[in-house]
Image: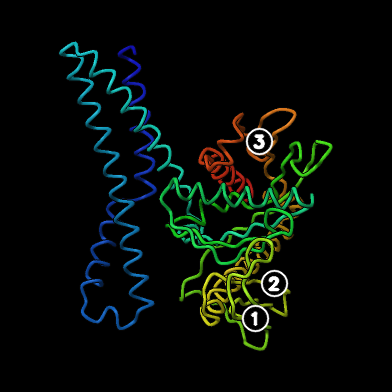
Amino acid sequence: MAGPDFETRIKALQATMHTIEQVLEPDRMRAEIADLGEQVAAPDLWDDQANAQRVTGRLSTLQGELDRYANLKQRLDDVEMLIEMAREEGDDESLADSEKELDRIAKAVEALEVRTLLSGEYDAREALVTIRSGAGGVDAADFAEMLMRMYTRWAERNKYPVEVFDTSFAEEAGIKSATFAVHAPYAYGTLSVEAGTHRLVRISPFDNQGRRQTSFAAVEVVPVLEQTDEIDVPEEEVRVDVYRSSGPGGQSVNTTDSAVRLTHLPTGLVVSCQNEKSQLQNKASAMVILKAKLLALKKAEEAAHLKELKGDVAASWGDQMRSYVLNPYQMVKDLRTNYESGNPQAVLDGEIDDFIEAGIRWRRGADKADQN
């Protein structure tokens, strides 16, 4: 690599880091960390468990973000010094190592830059993801299960814990629906761009004549609520049904009526949970999901009202958002951002970071356009 190219790349990365610094405001973060540290040290912190969890969670998130920023800034300074020393000594091997490190830094800086775009009210929250099969019969149910695997594999790659609340298996193959949580800071802001209708085109493995089949699945993403969120759900507005948990093909995995289904009568929203052995635990988990979806519904109605006032009749950006084509060619394409990959198997195995990044950047551009 020619010498001047190092300078160009480093200056570009330093400029991006400066932009990130303006968004993150490290001095403000350090002041908040110090204040939270004093709260954590207070002997009566855990007298209020909800507040203690909020304080410790916020402290952990802030410290992690600050460490990530500081580490990247230090790595960039170190590689700049290493390049200068390698040139002075004519050390081509060190220059080659520096180039590789610069590539790694560039990728990390880009990821951090995307994180700074997540500034929505609930973006920092954990995420509740619901996947439902749509049109396409058994192929759609199989596709829904493929999407669930894609997101859980993505979470595994990023070392994010996943908690499955409910899975409704289809009769022949796949799933009718599934709801699971991704427990990680900014999981909602990150995965919210995955919401919408996904389409699969392939030779159906369930068609004896080997015909091409198009099937659909819907992905819904809502933020996990905190105890401070104001969502009141009166008991008389919720119908509670209990039933036995079951696995694929109706195989019983529980001998008691521990699974719980909640129906919110005013809206018709239905949620269920069967991951716990206790009916009370399942009811509590189902209520968490219901409240999260009610909050998301409220926010969606408010957003729709604002768009109506603005005269915006464009369809929601989340609809028909991505196509996965396995036949007659291999392609995954996001219909909003036009980002595409020629390796559907890798995408379905959880390699979706580039799609998510493109979606976050696209959404930020759409939000700015709406504000004008």
Q: Secondary structure at mark 1?
A: strand
Residue 333 numbered mark, or none:
3
Counting from the top left corner in percent of width and height, residue 39 is at: 25, 72
Q: CA distance from mark 1 to mark 3?
A: 41 Å
Evaluate whether residue 6 shows in this view: yes
Residue at (22% x, 31% y) in the render: 78
Earlier-in-chain disc, 3 versus 2: 2
Q: Is residue 340 above or below residue 42?
A: above
Judge left or right: residue 85 versus residue 72.
left
For the residue pair 42 and 327, the one nearer the viewer reads as: 327
Judge left or right: residue 324 versus residue 355.
right
Residue 242 numbered mark, or none:
1
Q: CA distance from mark 3 to mark 2?
A: 31 Å
Judge left or right: residue 155 versus residue 345.
left
Q: Place residue 81 in its image quadrant.
A: top left
Image quadrant where one finds the N terminus: top left
Three-letter code for the amino acid on which mark 2 is drawn: Leu
Three-letter code for the amino acid on which mark 1 is drawn: Val
Residue 269 numbered mark, or none:
2
